[in-house]
Amino acid sequence: MPLGIGGRSRWSAGCRSARSSTGCGRPSPAVLESRTGLSAETVQAVLDGVHVPDWPGVAALATALGAAPLRLRPARDTLRMSFSTAPGHFPAGGISLADAASAGRAARQ
């Protein structure tokens, strides 16, 4: 199933909004790594809008940013539906949107 660019844009915008509007400043990926258990590289990829962690990762990152985890749920679920319509299906570790976009292009060729 192709990755919907609208879903990716909503995810990226949601992450940027959560990071900038919570009043906790702009903690670095290293600080967020210590608060979430996600690697600094994964945190940066999430904040760049190119990676979607599994729900525990989303919840941990949102909480570390001082945002309500459910604030990111609609955008995350939109992307999940781009990959599978099975409720609750989400790859362990999350989805790399860059890898998914590349796979979608290759499948269409």
Image (cartoon, helix red, strand yellow):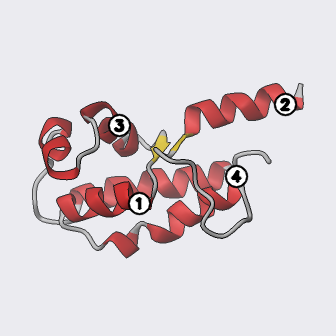
State the residue position of label 2. Answer: 107
Sooner in the amino-acid sequence: mark 1 or mark 2? 1
Sooner in the amino-acid sequence: mark 3 or mark 2? 3
Residue occupying image coordinates x 57% and y 48%: 91
Residue occupying image coordinates x 33% and y 64%: 59
CA separation in Å, label 1 and label 2:
28 Å
Circles 4 and 3: CB distance less than 8 Å? no
In the image, what residue type sits under mark 4? Answer: Phe
CA separation in Å, label 3 and label 2:
26 Å
Sooner in the amino-acid sequence: mark 1 or mark 4? 1
Relative side of 2 to 24, left or right: right
Sooner in the amino-acid sequence: mark 3 or mark 1? 1
Q: Secondary structure at mark 2?
A: helix
In the image, what residue type sits under mark 2? Answer: Ala
Question: Toward which corner of the image does residue 80 lie, by quadrant?
Answer: bottom right
Q: Position of residue 84 (x, y in %)?
A: 72, 57
